[in-house]
Amino acid sequence: MKFSQLLTRQASMPVETIPPTRSLWRQLLQHREARVGLLLALFLVGLALGGPLLAPYDPNRPNYREKLAPPSVEHWLGTDQAGRDQLSRVLVGGRQTLGTALLILSLIFGIGLVVGSIAGMSGGIVDVVLMRLVDIVMALPSIVLAIAIVGVLGPGFQNLILALVVAWWAYYARLTRSYVLNARQRPDVIAARLAGIGWGRIMLGHVLPGVAAQLLIIATLDLGALIAAIAGLSFLGLGVQPPTAEWGAMLSDSRLYVAVAPWLLLGPLVPIFLVVVAANLLGNALRDILDPARC
Amino acid sequence: MSQPVVHCRDLHVRYANGAHAVRGVDFALAPGECLALVGESGCGKTTIARAILGLLPPNAQVSGEIVVGSHVISAAAPGLLRRIRGREIGFVAQNPFAACNPLDRVERHVAEAWHAHGQTPPPGRIGAMLRGLGIDRAAEQMRHYPHQWSGGMLQRATIAAAAAHRPALIIADEPTSALDADRADSTLAVLRATGAAILLVSHDIGVVQRHADRVAVCYAGRIVELGSSAEVFAHPRHPYTRALLAATPRTAQGLPIPLAGTPPRLTEAIHGCAFAPRCAFAQPACQHHDPPLHHGVACPVLYPPGGAPTINVAREPETLTPPKRAPHNKVLTPVVEARRVAQRYGRGLRAVHAVRAASLAVRPGEIVGIAGPSGCGKSTLLRLLATIETPSSGEVWLNGELTTRGGSQRLFSAMARNGFVMPIFQDPLGSLDRRWPIWRSLTEPLTAPQRMKRPDAHQRRAIARERLAEVGLAHLDLEARPDELSLGQCQRIAIARALIAEPRLLVADEPTSALDASVAAGILRFLADAAYSGTAIVIVSHDRSLLDILCDRVLTMEQGILS
């Protein structure tokens, strides 16, 4: 099967009966793409957690006699501009990269969901104020906004997270709001309203599970972009501080030496690519499983 | 019969998931003839039409033979199919608005018939064709965009495109179901006027009866009865045909009779006659014999293999007595009363007056129908009565209490949010939360905070089991999700959900228009029963004959004015 086919699953045909298994986990395990994605994700998480144990060298020890060495038996992925073993840095950097990205993503997710729900549900002046705030954030390019925030607050790990969350949450809030507005007119929601069910329970029971499913799909697809953004800030010296190994920063570094040491790109590029692929596969699978109108 | 335009021999269509959608279909169409394929959803009628067009998805496996003119479609290469489509087979889709790109002028859509074959339309030809199909000022109107045309007009344009190369065959898949009833007849007349042989796929029995020459009744991927339209409708012979016609609200002789059961799952192997499990005349032999068409009927009882009919099928199926109607007392307080309610969207010159000063009072046990074409404001009126929307002027009273008043967003009485009014919607699937198991949706009204005794999950399942049995769904898995059910089952659950709240008023917006007649008849009975037990019902539909059968009074709405 071609990769493109793997990513865009063919729409299935009529009279398909849905297997009676209910739990999301079991459905994921039955979904072919999800299985590939889960395996990849498991591998990457394993890499992030166990990487430091596997690293053959100290990732931060420079060795200027061997800088920019090509791949060899001693250094499988070569060495970087400071002579540090690239493989060790890739293995150690995973924890930093994945951890930061997932932390930021969950913060964005939560803030977007809460703000969007409040705006969509309350309407009126609250909605207007919140949405103008969203407009302002969205009008500024996220990376520029993030740079500005880190620039004002000073570099550092916490500020990096703060900057990216502030620059990124607005998309999720807007998406949530539009979904909530739409859901207010849904027949099942109207029926619940007329039956006397309160808005809070309607939100929790009928509306938010659907929104969360939508956001989760976007979030898995955003993971790659977020890793790139962290890398960008690190590249500018505003994010992860050298000599900490981090894939994005390593990618930025190796870009400078692409003419003399192109193999350096491979080290961080392949795991980032795999993260994005795993996230996409899982995102697609989640969309298939969580979207009830899948046929 | 002269050389047939299209000829199918032993056509089978199987999908990769194991569904055997078409199971051995034979028919032929003479030049200029109109053959209608009728049957419930999922009976394979659309699949047959698509197979002739060569438009089935790649996971469909077609066997048997389809011959159109001199081409064997079933063995044709994609290139040949492209040349045949449009030239020898025209196609008219269900929804003309979906078939047209909203950014292109109507003219361009018709011209596409030529462009697709690398030609340019002869000058003036498109205008002349549209004029011929009854479009006034065609040369001017065809420069408009699809949304500026009405559905009926646009469907004529797609017919013009389909007939551009004078194909011998036009396939029309539900060409009228997206149109208002009064436009359906003229659309069919236009279609017939093209002179082509027409394969009409429709679930609208009335349209078929008026326009088709011959009718093929499909069930579970087979043709069970094939005959001239006049004969099949006057003297239906196959038990399925009889049941289908009995379920169609055609006359004012009482409520139609629902068809029990559901069609078989095509993914499972079918032994014997597929209709036998639902058939009132089924014999043990039906489990083994699935005879081919014999004198136009495929029924193991009527024409058993090598023998005479064993029973007399000519006897009438047992008739259901029309539900009793409670006399509604004029003295009783109206359950709902609208006093000169109006609803306006937007302001100034662009304002849309959806409802203009409508007054209406509905008393307990009364069924009031509101008829009218699409966009006449009848759904808006219903939403006002249910207090889902606040009117821009006028008042809505529920049970003698003021609930909403024009210009105020305030709800004056909590009654409106107490299950006093419950809705039934057009979209059965959307009426239920698609993530929830059906027991949870069904019993949700019982969990409203103002109710004294709120059942726990265990009790709710037990209640759901009882209520499902009342709407004839005792066999359903309580944990099933709406997507695993048929539309008819979803709608019955939606009705059960509405009734569990013990509403005094039911508002139903086109409750049967998404359903097959066989299923819709059952829905109408549930509504009639609810009214007998004292619930007032306001039902909105574009189908006047249905309202005439069901309702005590039918009001008409036209351009926002209720009369």
Image (spheres, coloured by chain):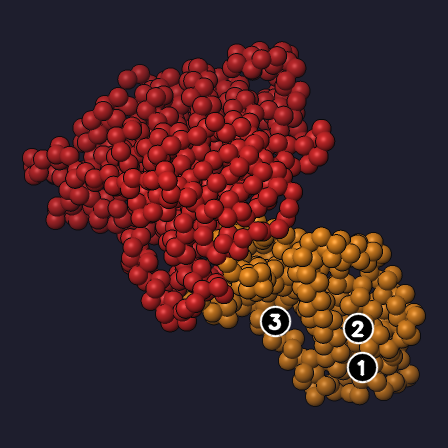
Chain colours: A orange, B red
Judging depth in this view, the residue of B517 and B213 nearest the camera is B517
Q: Residues at marks 2 and 1, common chain?
A: yes
Q: Image point 46% across, 43% down: which residue?
A: B336
Residue kind at label 2, given as amino acid type: Ile
- Picture coordinates of residue B399, whole percent (x, y): 45, 47
Residue A249 horizontal side relative to residue B377, left or right? right
Cα separation, mark 2 vs mark 1, equals 28 Å
Chain letter of disc 1?
A
Q: Image point 66% across, 53% down: which residue?
A: A178
Q: Please say if A41 is above or below B343.
A: below
Residue that carries the numbered disc 3 in the rendered image: A40
Residue that carries the numbered disc 2 in the rendered image: A161
Circles 2 and 3: CB atoms closer than 8 Å: no
Label 2 CA crowd tier, 10 Å (few <14, some 14–19, many 20+)? many
Tell me which corner region of the image, top left, top right, bottom left or bottom right, holds residue B35: top left
Residue kind at label 3, given as amino acid type: Leu
In this rendering, the label closer to the viewer, 2 or 3: 2
Q: Which mark is residue A85?
A: 1
Residue kind at label 1, given as amino acid type: Asp
Q: Give the number of marks.
A: 3
Label 3 CA crowd tier, 10 Å (few <14, some 14–19, many 20+)? some
